[in-house]
Each structure stands twice: as structure tokens, then as C-alpha cells.
Image (tube, rainbow, N blue to C red):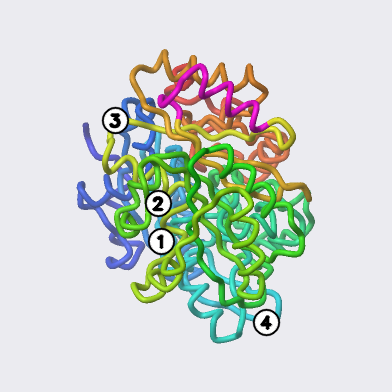
């Protein structure tokens, strides 16, 4: 296939250090963790951009947008590349916009901070320690994830049990967004309704330049690994901790046996026959948690928290979608789902799944707060055999009243987080009149080359 004509124009217009053309590098930068899904793995592996451009300033970014808009070149904005749904895979070639050099810490105040799009969340967390603050919540991939990438592609994470998700009011305070036009407009966004046009939008509605987020006071968290003979004991205990407003917490994560045995760095603390609960708790509530665990038959290791700190490990590496990652290292053909269980009937729903599928579905819960309510979110591991069987399992989830967020599609409206699709598409129409931003990621605008094929 011939290279597009516009590649020859780059050298005369942009700093050579900004331009990356090496085929293997462009291919790498055109991918995310889509391979978690055997469905997406089969469909998306051969897609790639034509080049990578890495601006270091707002001026350079605007020049790239102008260049692309005039020539009708697609742009896919990339942060750390840690998404799981093929969000950043270019379906129509074009420019992969690497934002990681846009990494200025604009301002940190008490309770909030403003950062350029490419600042890594791990960097923010490290810098915040000097101000006795921390991120409210972050994904398990926070050491690589950028702040704009998380906002445009994520949902919640470690800390969501206290502060909710990206959509919950008070977490994202403001965004500065550039439009995809020959003369890009800079939009300052602050209201909940306007912010929702850019949250979990895969970057189709605008290019985030800066983000202002709320911050939390720093806590010296205590790490727990508590094991239970039965999954139901682990679930009920985790429910009590998640709902107890007197216990300050950052993480309430539940894994059915034998999921936790895949966590290689802490394997000596796990048992393949036991369910596990991982917690991060404020130190003043440690005794209360230990007593509650004992009431449910939980076994706490006094050495675990010490081991984590001595070995400089991160609890985030053993929760959220890192659970799936550890499991896939041992079982590369397996996959996962995302589901929201019913807060009142989740035990029944789990039992229904286990009765029908036994170890074909391995339960993994992350308790979060969403819309002010504590809910059991989940990322269960699926012992994958065929696409048809995966579809059957997803139908069973829905049959049992579990809301599925399908991680086996790159289309926004099929992913289960579509409450704001009308607003996202309205913003795309206003900000990207030629449908150049990450084209093909929604049915509602220019059709995807794989439209109709992403259903599991």
C-alpha cells in the first residue's frame, strides 16, 4: 500500500523530533490492551496509523490540528495506551497524536490541581505527596496512564469506593478542549453536562489540552489481604466494609479462588482454595476491620502490609483490571467481562452464575460508589472457549439482572456506558465537522469499517 501524500509534507512543517515514521514504532503506538479480548484481538490486530506526531507545546498541537483538518487527515489522540477496548486503534490510518510530551503540571492548590493532557497519573501521585495530598481515584495502570487518557477512556478505579467515578460531580472540575477545525477553538468546560461530552468519549468529541481535578488529603493507607474458605463469606464481609461509613477506605476488592494465586509477587500469601479480599484502610480503622473479618471467618496475615511496604509493591497492581492481566499471563487464551451486580441481590446472582458455569466464570468484585450509592462492580474472568459461548455467558448475565459493559467491542454505544452518547455526538458534530477524530468508534457518525461485526 502506498504511503499517503501528506507524509512528505511533514518535514517542512514540523520539528523532526516530533515526527515518528518507523513502521514498528507506529504499529506499537497504534495499539492498546485490546488483546484482553479474543474478539478484538481477531478484528483489530492489523490496523495502524500512518505516523506518530508528539507535540511538546500547545502551539505545536494546534499546528498539527490545522495541518490535519486542512487535508482531512484522521487523528487518534493517545495517552499511555492502557485502554482495553481498542479505543486508540486507528481504523482509518492517519496521525497517532502522542500527548505524553504535553506534560506540564500547571498548578497544584489545596484540594485541586491543573495538569496538561500528557501528565502521567503516577507522576501526579508522586508530586502530590509533597503537598500532603493524593489522587481521589485512579486506574490500576496509573503509572503509565495519562490524565487526559484516563478521562477520555476510563471510568473509575482505586479510590472509587470513596469518591465515585469520572462522571460523579466534583471529581473533574474543568477541561480545556481543542476542536478539530482548520482554526481550532479552545473550549473551557466546567459544568457537569458539558464535561460529560468528553468523559469516556474515546476522544471523538475533542482533544483535551488540560484538566483540573479535585484532590484528596493524603492518607497512610494500611494494606490487607484477607482470605476466606467460601466466596460468599468474602462477598458478605466486603459488603459490610464497603457500606460502613465509619471506615475510611480506598480499595475493597474481592477475588474468587484461585484468582489471587496468579499475583506472583504476593503468591506466598495466597491459597488456591480460598477467596481473597484486598483492602486499603486508614490506619485508625485497622482493628475494626480485623474484628469484622473474624466475624466472617476471615484470615488476616499480620505480615502482609509490612511485606507490601518493604518490597515497595502497590496494591493497585493486584486489583481492578490488573487481576485480569495477572491471570492472562498464566492463561493467555482466557478473557473477562465487566458487569454491575444488583446491590441487594448480588449473592443470588453470583450463585446463579456459579450453578450454571462453575469455574468457567471466576468472580472478581470491585466495590465502588456511583451516583452516591455503593454498588458491586465486577470484572469476572471468563475461561474462554468460543465466541458463541462468550455471547451465551453475556446473555446469562443479563438474564440474571447483571448489567453488562461489553469489553469486546470498540464502539462506544455497545460498551455499556452510553448514558451520555447524545451529548458526546452533539459535541462531535460541533467540534469535529469532518469526523476526523478517531473515526469509526460510534455507529452514529461516519460508519466504522467493522460496523456490524463487533457484537459478541
Q: Which residue is pictured at 47% across the width and 43% down the height? A: 275
| Residue at which label 4 appears | 109
Q: Quadrant of residue 429?
A: top right
**Callout 3: helix, strand or loop?**
loop
In the image: residue 448, left or right of residue 113? left
**Callout 1: helix, strand or loop?**
loop
Q: Looking at this view, name the residue that lies furthest to the bottom.
A: 130
Residue at mark 1 to residue at mark 4: CA–CA distance: 24 Å
Percent position of residue 21, x then y: 24, 52
Q: Are marks 2 and 1 in contact (CB under 8 Å)?
A: yes
Instruction: Let me know if residue 203 is in the magenta part.
Output: no
Residue at mark 3 to residue at mark 4: CA–CA distance: 46 Å
If you read the primary sequence from the N terminus, does the residue marked by circle 2 or circle 1 appear first?
A: 2
| Residue at which label 1 appears | 144
Q: Where 81 falls versus 35 (above or below)?
A: below
Q: Which residue is pictured at 27% across the width and 35% down the height? A: 332
If you read the primary sequence from the N terminus, does the residue marked by circle 3 or circle 1 appear first?
A: 1
Q: Quadrant of the N terminus?
A: top left
If you read the primary sequence from the N terminus, does the residue marked by circle 1 or circle 4 appear first?
A: 4
Percent position of residue 257, x then y: 42, 39
| Residue at which label 3 appears | 333
Residue at mark 2 to residue at mark 1: CA–CA distance: 8 Å
Residue nearer the viewer, 282 or 218 = 282
Amino acid at each position: 500500500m502506498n504511503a499517503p501524500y501528506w507524509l512528505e509534507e511533514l518535514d517542512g512543517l514540523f520539528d523532526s523530533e516530533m515526527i515518528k515514521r518507523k513502521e514498528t514504532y507506529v504499529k506499537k503506538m497504534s495499539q492498546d490492551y485490546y488483546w484482553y479480548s479474543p474478539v478484538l484481538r481477531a478484528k483489530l490486530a492489523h490496523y495502524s496509523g500512518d505516523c506518530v506526531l508528539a507535540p511538546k507545546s500547545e502551539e505545536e498541537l494546534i499546528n498539527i490540528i490545522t495541518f490535519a483538518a486542512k487535508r482531512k487527515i484522521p487523528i487518534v489522540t493517545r495517552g499511555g495506551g492502557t485502554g482495553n477496548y481498542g479505543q486508540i486503534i486507528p481504523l482509518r490510518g492517519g496521525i497517532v497524536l502522542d500527548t505524553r510530551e504535553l506534560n506540564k503540571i500547571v498548578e497544584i492548590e489545596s484540594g485541586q490541581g491543573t495538569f496538561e493532557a500528557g501528565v502521567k497519573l503516577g507522576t501526579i501521585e508522586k508530586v502530590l505527596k509533597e503537598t500532603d495530598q493524593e489522587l481521589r481515584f485512579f486506574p490500576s495502570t496509573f503509572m503509565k496512564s495519562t490524565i487526559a487518557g484516563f478521562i477520555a477512556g476510563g471510568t473509575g478505579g482505586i479510590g472509587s469506593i470513596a469518591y465515585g467515578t469520572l462522571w460523579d460531580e466534583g471529581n473533574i472540575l474543568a477541561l480545556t478542549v481543542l476542536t478539530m477545525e482548520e482554526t481550532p477553538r479552545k473550549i473551557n468546560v466546567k459544568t457537569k453536562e458539558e464535561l460529560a461530552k468528553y468523559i469516556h468519549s474515546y476522544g471523538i468529541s475533542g482533544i483535551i489540552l488540560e484538566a483540573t481535578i479535585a484532590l484528596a488529603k493524603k492518607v497512610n493507607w494500611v494494606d490487607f489481604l484477607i482470605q476466606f474458605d467460601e466466596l460468599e463469606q468474602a462477598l458478605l464481609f466486603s459488603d459490610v466494609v464497603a457500606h460502613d461509613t465509619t471506615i475510611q477506605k480506598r480499595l475493597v476488592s474481592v477475588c474468587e479462588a484461585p484468582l489471587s494465586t496468579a499475583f506472583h509477587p504476593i503468591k506466598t500469601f495466597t491459597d488456591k482454595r480460598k477467596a481473597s479480599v484486598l483492602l486499603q484502610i486508614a490506619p485508625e480503622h485497622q482493628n475494626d476491620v480485623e474484628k469484622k473479618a473474624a466475624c466472617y471467618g476471615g484470615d488476616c496475615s499480620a505480615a502482609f502490609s509490612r511485606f507490601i511496604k518493604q518490597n515497595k509493591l502497590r496494591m493497585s497492581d493486584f486489583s481492578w483490571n490488573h487481576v485480569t492481566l495477572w491471570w492472562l499471563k498464566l492463561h493467555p487464551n482466557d478473557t473477562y467481562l465487566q458487569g454491575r451486580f444488583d446491590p441487594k441481590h448480588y449473592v443470588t446472582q453470583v450463585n446463579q452464575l456459579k450453578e450454571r458455569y462453575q469455574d468457567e466464570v471466576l468472580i472478581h468484585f470491585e466495590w465502588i460508589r456511583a451516583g452516591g450509592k455503593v454498588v458491586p462492580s465486577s470484572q469476572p474472568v471468563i475461561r474462554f472457549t468460543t465466541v458463541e459461548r462468550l455471547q451465551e455467558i453475556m446473555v446469562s448475565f443479563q438474564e440474571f439482572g447483571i448489567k453488562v459493559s461489553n469489553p469486546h467491542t470498540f464502539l462506544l454505544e455497545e460498551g455499556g456506558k452510553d448514558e451520555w452518547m447524545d451529548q458526546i455526538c452533539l459535541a462531535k458534530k460541533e467540534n469535529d465537522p469532518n469526523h476526523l477524530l478517531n473515526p469509526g468508534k460510534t455507529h452514529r457518525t461516519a460508519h466504522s469499517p467493522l460496523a456490524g461485526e463487533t457484537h459478541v
